[in-house]
Image (spheres, grey):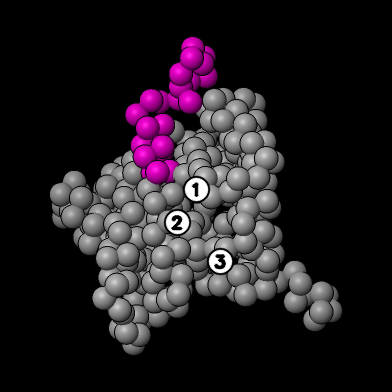
Amino acid sequence: MSSHRFHHVLPLLAVLGSVTALGLGTSIAKQLFPLVGSLGTTALRVGFSALLLLLIWRPWRWPLAQADRMSLLRYGVALGLMNLLFYMSLRTIPFGIAVAIEFSGPLAVALYSSRKPVDFVWLVLAIAGLGLLLPFGGNVQALDVTGVLYALAAAAFWGAYIVFGKRLGHLHAGHSVALGLTVAAITVVPFGIWHAGAALLAPQTLLIGLVVAAISSAIPISLEMVALKRLPQEAFGIMTSMEPAVAALLGLLMLNEQLNAQQWWAILCIMAAAAGSTLTARREPPVVAAELVQ
């Protein structure tokens, strides 16, 4: 492959690698549930992620204005609760479906900020996808209601995370994400300690938690930064809309989570809505590491 062609392919490979790494990290993390539960798994994943990014970015090198501190606090709390609720949803619903439902959060933010007629198409697609998944209206393929509600709550906090993250867009991405994850860890780690206690300190559990954090945070964020420097925003958004399908495939391969045809159609509808809304949205700088949910 010529260097010119590689220059164009590299950002696409970076986004694909980021999405795949996030899915792999979550698939591995779900195997910690029998040991420390969803709350303990969240504590390990977010806690180690914060430590890794603090070491990589050393955010104390940059000054932080007083006006940014409250925004950073809201951003970090939203990030922490988003992770916590997402992992709680994974206890009872498949990984790919949880991601698809959770995509309704950023999709709602994107559609709210745009007033183009074509956005009605993406809204209809998103509603159709959710309608095929939500356990209401006599759906014979109904999912667990509690798991779906956790995923919807996680979607709401993902939307809040994006809104608060845009207010920090003037900061270096490593600065805001490292500090945001630190606030997220302070928010969720106490829940894990309360639920799992000393089980969190088992050497094997700590090792798996560290691996999950590296795969789910350090690697995807680094790859996203490579992609964002070289891809237009709409291309980046369309590529990341693959995430529900990647999650569903990894759930099948690594967790043996079988989805039926109706659920696959629902995922495709939500992916199409996410890709379409990205393509027609107003051009704004994307929030780096917006997929730290997985």
Name which of mark 3 and mark 2 comes first in the sequence.
2
Q: Residue at x 41, y 37 (%)?
A: 152
Residue under pointer 3: 285
**Residue position for label 2:** 162
Can you tell which mark lies on residue 231? Answer: none
The residue type indicated by label 3 comes to: Pro
**Residue 79, x across and y down, in percent:** 36, 56
Secondary structure beneath dot 1 equals: helix
Judging by the rendered image, the residue that carries numbered circle 1 is 109
Task: Identify the mark nearer the N-term, 2 or 1.
Answer: 1
**Residue type indicated by callout 1:** Val
Q: Earlier in the sequence, mark 1 or mark 3?
A: 1
Marks 3/2 in contact by CB < 8 Å: the verdict is no
Q: Alpha-carbon distance for marks 1 and 3?
A: 14 Å
Q: Is residue 31 above or below residue 22?
A: above
* Image coordinates for residue 27, horizontal then vertical, percent: 47, 49
SS class, disc 3:
loop
